[in-house]
Amino acid sequence: MVRLTPPMGWNSWNTYGQNINETLIKETADCMASSGLADLGYNYLVIDDCWSLKERDENKRLVADPEKFPNGMKAVADYVHSKGLKFGMYSCAGNLTCAGYPGSYEHEFIDAQTFAEWGVDFLKYDYCYHSDIVPGEILYRRMGLALENCGRDILFSACSWGSDETHKWIKTSAASMWRSTGDIFDSWESIKNLTKQQLALHPYNGVGCFNDMDMLVVGMYGKGNVGLGGCTDVQYKTHFSIWAFLGSPLMIGCDIRSMTSEAKSILSNKDMIAINQEPLLRQPYPLKGIWANDDLIMYARNLSDGDIAIGLFNLSSEKCVARFNMDELGLPVSLGKTLRMKDIWTQKEAKVMNGTVMWELEPYDCAVLRAKLADL
Ligand code: GLA
């Protein structure tokens, strides 16, 4: 099936790593359904690495670890589906997964079959321990073919971290999203880093196959498997805004069972989600701005109703003023047009003076303006 908008959901890796089990997954499914997150669009629940035994069975099939998943994966999938959610799993294009469990190399078709029988709707496919001989391009094409012929609609989520110039070949496979960055960690440095890794990759994002900037760390506060000191709520707000604005899939990574109200309200910002889920995903473009620098990132994106989304992201620890000229958006003052702009986080209106927009930003903060065309 063609995926028209970036997939949204929750993934076990960021918080739990190998400490996953049936109870945790069921409680997370309950929470996704009852907290309202599913209604906002977060509907894929994905189990990441470390779910299987270290050996395949006598028929070469993957086996769920009976200590972690005593009733098998089909039972977990059924439970997740009973909550109105979709069920995701994980494997790897190499001999082993990144954490050392069996990978799908040379077992692609049998594994796709197994996932289909269990009722899987989404497969994240990693790139550790991959062959030196068969290129990634072919490995992803293989699993893509296996999934497209397994008799079930399974979203293929490629995870080769942008390596081997993934952007040049990933759309030859059946992937609906592809990891365009290295792994995220719960620190501001990591968020900044991944944001900058995207700069050259925007032309490759679009409907049908989305650039995946990795799972969100919003609400982790340094706890869990990828915790590295954690971030503040302002930093999480900016992180979420960047991922949503640039059209990345939005996969929550925190423990949603004990989420703070701040984290929940960031993840639940409907206007931000609406920009992420825009039907067209026109390419975001960086604004040069006036006196901008590397740590002040400004982007614009044309929306399908004629509005323009403008993201002003202060990545630095200093206050700053974002300034840009409307010329850059295609609106010179000479044409008699201006913009009415509101920040979707604060509802504050932006002012335009002689075609220049100015906006003050606190350290690490952002503004995301939804701009409507108006006559001067
Ligand atoms: C890689 C991926 C992560 C996660 C781990 C699991 O590092 O990029 O997202 O899936 O493997 O081992």
Image (spheres, grey):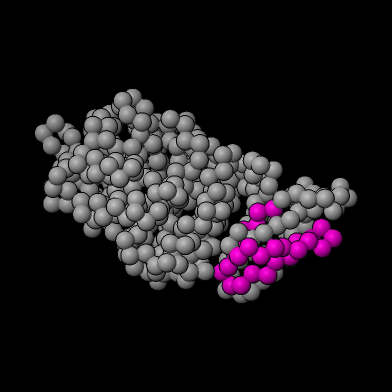
Rendered location of residue 258, percent (x, y): 33, 65
Above/below status of 203 relative to 269: above
Q: Quadrant of residue 110?
A: top left
What is the chief secondary structure element of the magenta stretch?
strand
Rendered location of residue 185, percent (x, y): 41, 62
- Along the horizontal axis of the image, is 190 left or right of 205? left
Rendered location of residue 299, percent (x, y): 64, 54
Residue 95 visible to the viewer: no
- Determine the residue positioned at 59% across, 39% down: 280
The residues colored magenta run: 346-371
Find out whether residue 366 is within the magenta segment: yes
Q: Quadrant of residue 24?
A: bottom left
Above/below status of 368 relative to 169: below
- Along the horizontal axis of the image, is 181 left or right of 284? left
- Determine the residue positioned at 55% across, 42% down: 205
Residue 275 visible to the viewer: yes
Above/below status of 96 relative to 258: above
- Along the horizontal axis of the image, is 360 left or right of 258? right
Q: How many marks?
A: 0
Q: In this rendered view, identify the residue nearer to me: 15 or 286.
A: 15
Rendered location of residue 14, percent (x, y): 35, 58
- Determine the residue positioned at 30% across, 45% down: 83
- Along the horizontal axis of the image, is 375 left or right of 141? right
- Determine the residue positioned at 82% across, 63% down: 353
Q: Quadrant of the N terminus?
A: top left
